[in-house]
């Protein structure tokens, strides 16, 4: 899920950026520093949307750098347990399949795929029901439920399930 | 428990005039017994050892106790749910798509500045938000769902409903099991809100 959130960060700025454009420089450095990063607490920082306020700078002892406390608003993407996501399948193998929802990777183990779906190897590996009516392969869209998350310094990895009511394939690339 | 140990220690102190070392050791043993899992191990080892071992065991135990308390405290902070502290607003995919799209439009102007690069996660986020926003009129979705908030449905639950856009009350209950716990909310109210929501959907 996306969240709009206010975060704070201490920005260190080199004196060469001081002057009339100090604020602009600070903001562009903030965007460069935080956009695309991922933290366990807040998830992926997708975009900075605004600056709340910039505090008074503090000169670092021994260097010319100045630290500014910056409060900013941003859009973050953070999956959580129990959330329903619609994800695109990126890889299928006999262990299960990987899917992607925005910047987040989700793995669905074959234990969490309905029992009537069997793995079919071949050019396009897929999971298919015995009557062939439902098929999960690369680029399929599935609705899944997050049952666990693991957070890394740079990415969030989720475990999902489609073995529940109202979960599973939404659309099949072969039928479109 | 603390009263007991205190009384035990007092007894030890009173009787311990003749053999203070063993009594103080007993006092320690009582202390160990408060510490749960270590109890059996700790109370056994002093029995087997001599007097000298008592004090060693005691010191070791204290160290162990210290570790134990620190480890038992550690998991607690990591457990709390995803609830952010404050200043947080859940965004439905359609709302997020709107915000991100506006930013991207601005980026086109900024992109002449080569030092600003649009991160991969921005593109992926925007693409995801766009593909998942199923509403023709996203601005009314919030209003429609806000009606449910009066029945104790939380912000994040509303967002999940808004994103998944279930068609029936049963589907909503299956996708968001926590809705079952809301006493004031019944399936009719939910169904009404969902059918309102369905009207806002983009024709496919």
Image (cartoon, coloured by chain):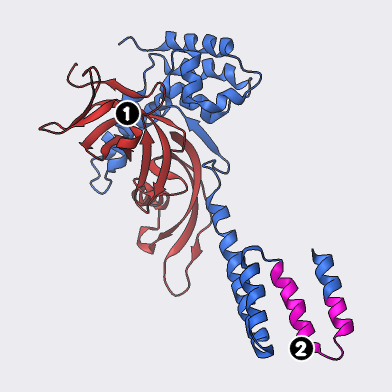
Q: Could you tell whether A64 is left or right of B104 in the image? A: right
Residue A115 image label: 1
Does residue A30 appear anywhere in the picture?
yes
Say which chain is blue: B
Classify mark 2: helix, strand or loop: helix
Q: Quadrant of the C terminus of chain B?
A: top left
Q: CA distance from mark 2 to mark 1?
A: 67 Å
Name the spot of residue B175 as percent of width and height, x first.
46, 24
Q: Which residues are magenta?
A: B9-33
Say which chain is red: A
Q: Which quadrant holds residue B111?
A: top left
Q: Mark 2 falls within which chain?
A: B
Q: Residues within 10 Å of mark 1 (few under 14, many from 20)?
A: few
Classify mark 1: helix, strand or loop: loop
Does residue A138 appear anywhere in the picture?
no
Residue that extends furthest to the left in the rendered view of this protein? A123
Name the spot of residue B30 as percent of width and height, x first.
75, 72
Q: From the viewer's perspective, is residue B169 above or below residue A24?
A: above
Residue wearing tag 2: B21
Residue under the image location 27 percent in, 27 percent down? A117
Residue under the image location 86 percent in, 71 percent down? B7
Residue that extends furthest to the front in the rendered view of this protein? B48
- Asked whether residue A119 is drawn in magenta, I would say no
Residue under the image location 37 percent in, 24 percent down? A167
Name the spot of residue A112 as percent of width and height, x first.
35, 34
- Pointers 2 and 1 in contact (CB under 8 A)? no
Magenta region's main secondary structure? helix
- Asked whether residue B27 is drawn in magenta, I would say yes
Q: From the viewer's perspective, is residue B77 above or below residue A51?
A: below
């Amino acid at each position: 899920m996306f969240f709009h959130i206010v975060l704070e960060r201490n920005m260190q700025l080199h004196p060469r950026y001081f002057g009339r454009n100090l604020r602009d420089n600070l903001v562009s450095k903030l965007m460069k520093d935080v956009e695309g990063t991922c933290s366990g607490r807040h998830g992926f920082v997708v975009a900075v949307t605004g600056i709340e306020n910039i505090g008074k700078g503090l000169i670092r002892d021994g260097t010319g750098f100045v630290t500014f406390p910056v409060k900013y608003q941003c859009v973050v993407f953070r999956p959580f347990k129990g959330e329903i996501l619609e994800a695109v399948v990126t890889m299928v193998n006999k262990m299960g399949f990987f899917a992607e929802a925005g910047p987040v990777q989700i793995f669905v183990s074959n234990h969490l795929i309905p029992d009537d779906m069997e793995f079919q190897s071949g050019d396009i590996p897929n999971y298919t029901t015995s009557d062939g009516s439902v098929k999960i392969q690369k680029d399929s869209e599935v609705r899944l439920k997050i049952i666990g998350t693991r957070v890394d310094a740079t990415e969030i990895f989720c475990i999902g399930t489609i073995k529940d009511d109202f979960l599973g394939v939404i659309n099949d690339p072969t039928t479109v | 428990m603390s009263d007991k140990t205190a009384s035990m220690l007092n007894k030890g102190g009173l009787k311990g005039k003749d053999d203070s070392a063993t009594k103080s050791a007993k006092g320690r043993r009582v202390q160990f017994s408060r510490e749960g899992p270590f109890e059996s191990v700790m109370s056994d080892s002093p029995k087997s050892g001599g007097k000298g071992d008592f004090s060693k065991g005691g010191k070791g135990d204290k160290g162990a106790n210290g570790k134990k308390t620190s480890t038992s405290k550690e998991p607690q902070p990591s457990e709390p749910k995803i609830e952010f502290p404050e200043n947080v607003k859940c965004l439905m995919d359609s709302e997020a798509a709107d915000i991100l799209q506006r930013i991207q439009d601005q980026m086109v102007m900024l992109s002449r500045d080569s030092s600003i690069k649009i991160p991969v996660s921005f593109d992926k986020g925007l693409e995801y938000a766009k593909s998942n926003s199923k509403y023709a009129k996203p601005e009314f979705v919030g209003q429609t769902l806000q009606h449910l908030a009066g029945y104790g449905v939380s912000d994040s639950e509303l967002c999940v409903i808004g994103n998944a856009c279930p068609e029936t009350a049963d589907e909503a209950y299956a996708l968001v099991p926590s809705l079952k716990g809301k006493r004031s909310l019944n399936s009719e109210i939910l169904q009404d809100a969902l059918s309102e929501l369905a009207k806002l959907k983009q024709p496919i």
